[in-house]
Image (cartoon, grey):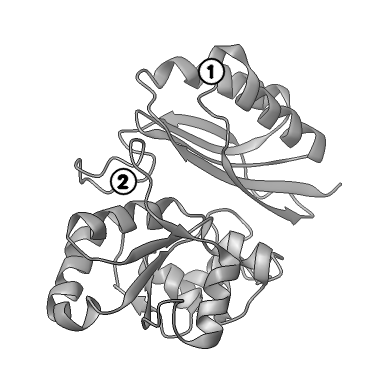
Amino acid sequence: MEIVNIAAYKFVGIPEPAQYQTVIKERCLALHLKGTVVLAEEGINLFLAGSRESIDTFLTYLQSDAFFSGRFTALDIKESFSSNQPFKKMVVRIAKEIITMRHPMIRPETFRAPHIDAATLRKWLDQGRDNEGRELILLDTRNSFEVEMGTFENAIDLHIEKFSDFPDAVSATMEKSKTALREKTIVSFCTGGIRCEKAALYLHEKGHPKVLQLDGGILRYFEDVGGAHWQGECFVFDERVSLDPGLKASGKTLADRKDGK
């Protein structure tokens, strides 16, 4: 049986996220889904895998059930497929943030970062400029070990170990190149869109005039336009380890990643 893998998130105010924890886990277990769901006051972030029917049933439930009062409609969902279940168990946990930045002034549940779709980014990379003639800067917001497995050509690597390191690392990088970067368009990117959305908001807060988030991240880019201007694979946080631009498991193992292969 083919396994459907989904990555999805939504920044949306959830005053009491703990009230959703048990009901979501029970529904996932009943549908034989495995993966991780993170709930916080700023929204939901999930990685799930199971049969086509189970995934569709869960998403319908999550997006339409009266218990959730419509909070989880319009999830940003990315899909890929595998022959085996890539998760060992089902976890639903409560966190302070659905992706940890530790920068409380960034509130993506109240204001979304300007974004660019995959097809437009591909066009801009092909022509070497955005539609206003500005030079592009691609900013990788992921951890250094992820970047090592693959990234866009000529992207900036901040060499961070965790996303909470991003504010200090990017501030130092921007300070060194302040004048030059203000004349360019920065496109932040990450695996599925969640980190680069917060990253773009942070850079806007710091006064950069033109910052965009890659909508849906690398996975949506692969889904919509393939591997143009990409080098390597994309790391994913499950037993598949990484995906190629065709959204197929690369065949690497966790041991390969630890060995740097």
- Farthest-out residue, right: 1
Label 2: few (<14), some (14–19) or many (≥20) C-alpha neighbours in 10 Å = some
115 vs 235, nearest the viewer: 115
1 and 2 marks in contact (CB < 8 Å): no
Q: Using the rendered image of the protein, determine whether residue 168 is visible from the camera's viewpoint.
A: yes
Residue sitting at x 76%, y 51%: 84
Q: Which residue is mark 1?
A: 68
**Which amino acid type is shown beneath numbered disc 1?**
Phe
Residue sitting at x 25%, y 44%: 106
Would you say 29 lies left or right of 1 here? left
Point out which mark residue 57 bears: none
Q: Which residue is mark 2?
A: 100
**Which amino acid type is shown beneath numbered disc 2?**
Thr
Check the image and report above or below for 54 versus 211: above
Q: CA distance from mark 1 to mark 2?
A: 24 Å
Mark toward the viewer: 1 or 2: 1
**Circle 2 SS class:** loop
Q: Where residue 195 appears, x then y in whole percent? A: 39, 54
Would you say 85 lies left or right of 53 here? left
Q: Where residue 29 appears, x then y in whole percent? A: 66, 25
Check the image and report above or below for 27 versus 156: above
232 vs 257, nearest the viewer: 232
Q: Earlier in the sequence, mark 1 or mark 2?
A: 1
Q: Quadrant of residue 199?
A: bottom left
Q: Quadrant of residue 72?
A: top right
Check the image and report above or below for 125 versus 25: below
Would you say 109 lies left or right of 149 here? left
Q: Where residue 64 appears, x then y in whole percent? A: 64, 21
Residue sitting at x 71%, y 69%: 246
**Circle 1 SS class:** helix
All told, the count of numbered labels is 2
Q: Quadrant of residue 11?
A: top left
